[in-house]
Structure formats: C-alpha cells, structure tokens
Image: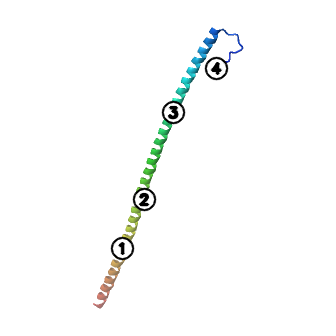
C-alpha cells in the first residue's frame, strides 16, 4: 500500500504518523523494486543485443563457410569435367591409333598374301 485516504476516519495523530511512516516505507520499497526491475530490463536488453550480435556473426560465418564450400565444390566439378573431357579425348586418340594400327596390319597382311601368291 503506497497511498491511503484516511480523511473522515477518526484516527489519532500517532496512528496517522504510523500509517504515514508505513506508507513511506512501502513507497521506498516500491521505488527500489522499480529501480531493480529497470536495471534488470536494461541488462536484459544489453544481453539480447549482445546475443543478437553473436547470432549475426555466426550467420555471417556460416554464409562465408557455405560460399567457400560452394566454390570448392565448383572447382572440383570443373576439374572432374576437365578430366572427363581429357579422358574422352585420350580414348578417341587411342581408338584412332588402334584403327590406324589395324589398317596397317591389314595392309601388311594383304601385302604378305600377295607375295605368297606370286611365289
């Protein structure tokens, strides 16, 4: 209780002083309680801001890490594609070489048969 209207009551001066003293004590306690609550709210706001900043830094690090990972994966994909193209090119070269060698073989074989028939 912080306020009271005692007018119209038959209260002695001592009772009125005692009531006023109690009201003042209650006001002082209420004031202290409000100051404590305000300090707590301020502390909570600062903590919330600090936490928000930590969350933002964490999110930025996560985004940076994801970007690095994506670039790394892209480089790996490009290397794999390059390797596949080189492998295909090498396979084509090998196939052409095999065809050329087989053609040479067939030509030599045919030439050898002709020589045998002439003899």
Q: Upstream in the sequence, badge 4 or badge 3?
A: 4
Residue that sits furthest to the left in the current view: 119
Q: Upstream in the sequence, badge 2 or badge 3?
A: 3
The image shows residue 74, relative to residue 38, as above or below, that is below
The spot of residue 31 in percent (x, y) is 56, 24
Disc 2: which residue: 74
Q: Which mark is residue 42?
A: 3
The spot of residue 107 in percent (x, y) is 33, 83
Q: CA distance from mark 4 to mark 3?
A: 28 Å
Disc 4: which residue: 3
Disc 1: which residue: 93
Q: Upstream in the sequence, badge 3 or badge 1?
A: 3
Q: CA distance from mark 2 to mark 1?
A: 28 Å
Dots 4, 3 in contact, CB < 8 A: no
- Residue under the image location 37 percent in, 68 percent down: 86
Instruction: Answer left or right for 58 relative to 103.
Output: right
């Amino acid at each position: 209780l912080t306020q009271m209207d005692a007018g119209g009551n038959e209260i002695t001066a001592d009772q009125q002083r005692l009531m006023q003293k109690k009201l003042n004590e209650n006001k002082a306690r209420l004031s202290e309680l409000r100051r404590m609550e305000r300090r707590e709210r301020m502390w909570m706001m600062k903590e919330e801001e600090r936490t928000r900043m930590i969350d933002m830094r964490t999110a930025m690090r996560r985004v940076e890490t994801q970007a690095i990972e994506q670039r790394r994966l892209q480089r790996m994909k490009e290397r794999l594609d390059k390797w596949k193209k080189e492998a295909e090119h090498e396979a084509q070269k090998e196939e052409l070489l095999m065809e050329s060698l087989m053609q040479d073989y067939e030509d030599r074989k045919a030439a050898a048969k002709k020589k045998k028939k002439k003899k």
